[in-house]
Amino acid sequence: MNVQALLQMNTIFISILIESLPFILLGVLISGIIQIFVSEEMIAKIIPKNPILSVLSAIGAGVFFLACECGIVPITRRLIAKGVPLSAAIAFMLSAPILNPIVLFSTYIAFGNSWSMVFYRGGIAFAVVLIIAFILSFQFKTNQLKQEHIEHKHHHKLTFNDKITGMFKHSIEEFFSVGKYLIIGALLAAAIQTFLKTSLLLEIGQGKLSGNAVMMALSYVMSLCSQADAFVASSFRSTFSPSSLVAFLVFGAMFDIKNTIMLLGTFKTKFVLCLMAYIFISVLGLTLLFIS
């Protein structure tokens, strides 16, 4: 380990933090708003009783949230704690970083104003979210949060100023709660990017199956923000197939090192490992089946 390598790791670490922090701040602020201003009764009225409709409505809500895969975690935790079904909350968490207009537009620009990659990315992501939500609705009957008990607020007894104060207090607590996992994840991602030889991955990923798997592993290691990952993926167009590039764009926006650490701090370990395995298999299978 030399000084140059450490400096490179430090640069990558800081860039990941700078890229992620705005979305974390937005996420914890929205989490604070949900905690103080949204009651369990309001959630019960908004979320459809039908499991399929609840998942579809969650995906629709995800389209309008300009959040990355780490910034969406505190929002998801708060929604589940407020009574949103696990399958619907995870559908929201997985769809928001990919299906929002900013990410899709950046994909369009990165691939030379081509709509095909946008449709591939959005279509595969939508299919994966539906598959995952279906599996979770049958396998897990509890909310899977590590801390299942939440503080119930008596909204009618608080003045507006009290609510604003409580919102910011909760947001600050949430920031320090999830922030430590972001730092650990960013440090791990920076270390792996620095000391793992990318040339080795490129050499392994020459076959169709191995190419998709390698690009998914690369997206996990690089831990890019979903608003910028398309520009990195486009740089591999001469090396990897469109199927591998879509696998990179979908899996990396759902799972990477930094948000894995955050998820492990929020959900039970078995649930996180199952979720990762299901997403990996779904993305790999769908990209191999439908994209050449």
Image (cartoon, helix red, strand yellow):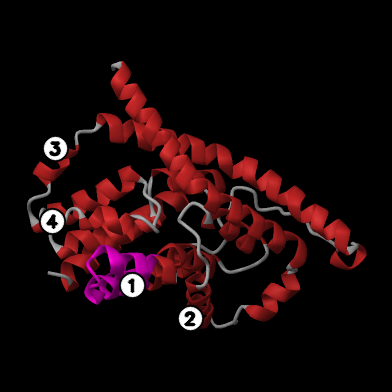
- On the image, the x and y values in percent for residue 201 come to 16, 42
Q: Earlier in the sequence, mark 3 or mark 2?
A: 2
- In the rendered structure, are the residues bearing label 3 and label 1 in contact, judged by CB atoms less than 8 Å apart? no
Query: Of 150 and 292, which appears nearest the observer?
Result: 292
Q: Amino acid at mark 1?
A: Gly
Query: Of 51 and 141, which appears nearest the observer?
Result: 51
Point out the frontmost of discs 3 and 2.
Answer: 3
* Residue linked to disc 3: 200
* Residue linked to disc 2: 52
Give SS at disc 2. helix
Give SS at disc 3. helix
Q: Amino acid at mark 4?
A: Phe
| C-alpha span from label 4 to label 2 | 36 Å
- In the rendered structure, are the residues bearing label 2 and label 1 in contact, judged by CB atoms less than 8 Å apart? no
Is 152 on the left-hand or right-hand side of 280? Answer: right
Span highlighted in magenta in the image:
103-128
Q: Is residue 111 magenta?
A: yes
| C-alpha span from label 2 to label 1 | 19 Å
Q: Which mark is residue 240?
A: 4
| C-alpha span from label 3 to label 1 | 30 Å
Q: Which mark is residue 122?
A: 1
Structural crowding at the residue carrying mark 4, measured as other residues with C-alpha within 10 Å and reported as few (<14), some (14–19) or many (≥20): many
Q: Earlier in the sequence, mark 4 or mark 1?
A: 1
